[in-house]
Amino acid sequence: MDAIAAQAIEVKAWLSAQGYDQLHFELPIQEIRADGSQTNAIVDCLAESPTGYLILDHKSGRCPDPAARFAGYMPQLRAYADLLTARGGKPVHMLAINWMNEGVISVIPAQKKETA
């Protein structure tokens, strides 16, 4: 338990150093479309700065190669970003995964690359 508490302190300090001083945990988000269909999600941690958001998802269990696994979680993270963007307000700047067992955070810009 002490290791988890220490990691939480480190993650909070890292987010603060990046300018994300407000943290929202287990944040439910929902989209209800005109046809009545819904998308529901719970964001592990939504970090907020004065200019935007960073979505931080926590993953437990061994992950010897976080960089290789990151791509597999992109659809989930992009869906969260799309739901937040649809609400209006601040933009989502970054998407991140906290690989808890590895003590590593992987981060990428939230902007989708446009193809020609």
Image (cartoon, grey):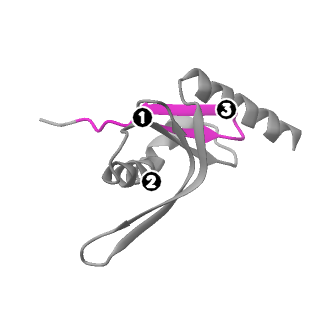
Q: Residues within 10 Å of mark 3 (few under 14, many from 20)?
A: some
Which amino acid type is shown beneath numbered disc 3?
Val
Residue 60 sits inside the magenta stretch: no
Label 1 vs 2, first from the N-terminus: 1
Location of mark 1 (residue): 52
Q: Secondary structure at mark 2?
A: helix
Location of mark 2 (residue): 76
User: Could you say which quadrant of the image residue 56 lies in?
Assistant: top right
Residue 48: % across, % down: 51, 37
Residue 96 sits inside the magenta stretch: yes
* Residue 86 shown left or right of residue 49 in the figure: left
Q: Quadrant of the N terminus?
A: top right
Residue 108: % across, % down: 43, 32
Q: Residue at x 33, y 76 (%)?
A: 37
Residue 31: % across, % down: 37, 65
Question: Which residue sits furthest right?
Answer: 2
Instruction: Relative to 107, say whether 63 is above or below.
Output: below
Residue 28: % across, % down: 52, 60
Which amino acid type is shown beneath numbered disc 1?
Gly
Label 2 vs 3, first from the N-terminus: 3
Q: Chief secondary structure of the magenta span? A: strand
Location of mark 3 (residue): 11
Q: Secondary structure at mark 3?
A: helix
Q: Residue at x 62, y 46 (%)?
A: 58
Asked whether the residues under the numbered discs 2 and 3 touch, taking CB atoms below 8 Å apart as contact, a structural biologist would say no
